[in-house]
Image (tube, rainbow, N blue to C red):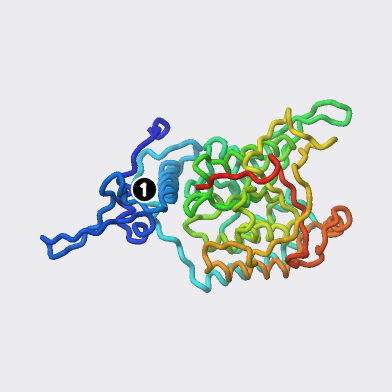
Amino acid sequence: MWDLVQTFNMYDPMALLASIPTRRAYFFEAVVRKDDFHEGVEHLIIGIDKETTGISSKSDDLHDFLLTSWIRAAGRPREGVDVEEARPEELDSEDFTAALDPMITHSEEQMEKLNANVLGLLENEWPRLCGSSLAQTWRDRDQFMRAIDGPPMLVLDWVTVLRLGRIPHSAENRGLSLSDAFEIADKEEFLTVDEQGAEKKIKMRFFIEMFSHRWSSRFTPDDRWNSKARALVEWGRYRQSMGLRTFFWVDYCCINQGDIAPGVAMLPLYVSSCNNIVCYDTPPYEPRSWCRVERLLFAAFVAPNCEFLNPEFVFDPETADWIPNSKEIKPVEDGRGKVPDPDGPDSQLSYDNDRPLISELIKLCKTHWAKTWKPGLKEIVKTKMGLEGIDELTFGTTELRLRRYGPGGWTEVDES
């Protein structure tokens, strides 16, 4: 049935939301009427007429919340069903109310233990692994992360995004374990040409890229046109042309959105297990504190590099501006920039109670700066790329390599 549905009204879900005081206060503007026949009982009326709709100024948030909740319920596979396109036979009460489940909480002791275990891996095991490529060490990293009882690292296949037309929610169980993703990559080949001009097939390289982005609203990461989903697919196609079978780490899909704290604690391990970071390049993105933290973590633990993806990026192998004798296309901009402070006066933070956690992550990056980079990388970026302030992390001094792909300059995107 769901494949045939084009539009439908959401009166009942809206009535359910209106019955929850916190949601009612955020999404609706009720008119109070007293019932003089029943001892002055107050009635809250939402939607008197077409002018007084009862919907607050947060109408876009209401749209995103309802749409995301329905997608989570209608798109969730039944338990035990492996078929990717499976739809539930019926939306039972558990599925229907999944979007309203309370956030899972953890004791202070539990989080302290997990944070200590994460720090232990960063200090003891990750430096030992940095001498080898991720292709050789991903199994070790995966085993270490699973051994500390934190949520294992998941990745999202861009082919899944292509099939769905959107970025899936974590509750849809579309995230893949590293071993499952590797198996997909290991089975695929691509056509290349050797030095003698002969065509040959070689295996795709397993590749993981962190997708750093600013959510479009409190309730959904993408806009209603699924612009980020489209950009991920285009980038995945580009990577495939290079022989890279790329998978993305996307917070919305790869961290349990009903149990966020453990995933955030594991964030340094997730980021440091990626080959690259791709940043969704819109004007609101750069100053966001959490977006700066993600870029900082990658620079501290992997490499002083950031690649920015314009929302209008389209990969066309026929018209792409290729770097000579290379499988890479030319970025529209290839330069340097100083590391921005996630806790600086120009940074933007939606929830001020996140500030202590951001401060701890900044300290972590300063303490472990460059300790898990590949051997020799520091000298390469200093001598060949001319990056300054690389020996230690200093905001306003330390530089990163910045490359932008897609149309030049900023693209104004309506994220409402």
Residue plotted at (28% across, 49% down): 47
Q: Nearer the viewer, residue 325 or 163?
A: 325
Residue 178 seen in this snapshot: no
Q: Nearer the viewer, residue 176 or 22?
A: 22
Residue plotted at (48% across, 67% down): 106
Toward the top, the furthest residue is 198
Give the quadrant of residue 41. bottom left
Q: Nearer the viewer, residue 193 or 37?
A: 37
Q: Position of residue 88 (x, y in %)?
A: 40, 40
Number of disc labels: 1
Q: Position of residue 221 (x, y in %)?
A: 53, 49
Give the vertical position of 24 relative to 278 (above or below).
below
Q: Position of residue 357 (x, y in %)?
A: 58, 68
Q: Circle 1 sits in a helix, a strand or a loop, which is it?
A: helix
Toward the front, the furthest residue is 51
Residue 100 seen in this snapshot: yes
Give the vertical position of 155 relative to 204 (above or below).
below
Give the quadrant of residue 295. bottom right
Residue plotted at (68% across, 52% down): 274
Toward the left, the furthest residue is 37
In this rendering, position of residue 83 left or right of residue 137 = left
> Residue at label 1?
96
Q: Amino acid at mark 1?
A: Phe
In this rendering, position of residue 234 left or right of residue 197 = left
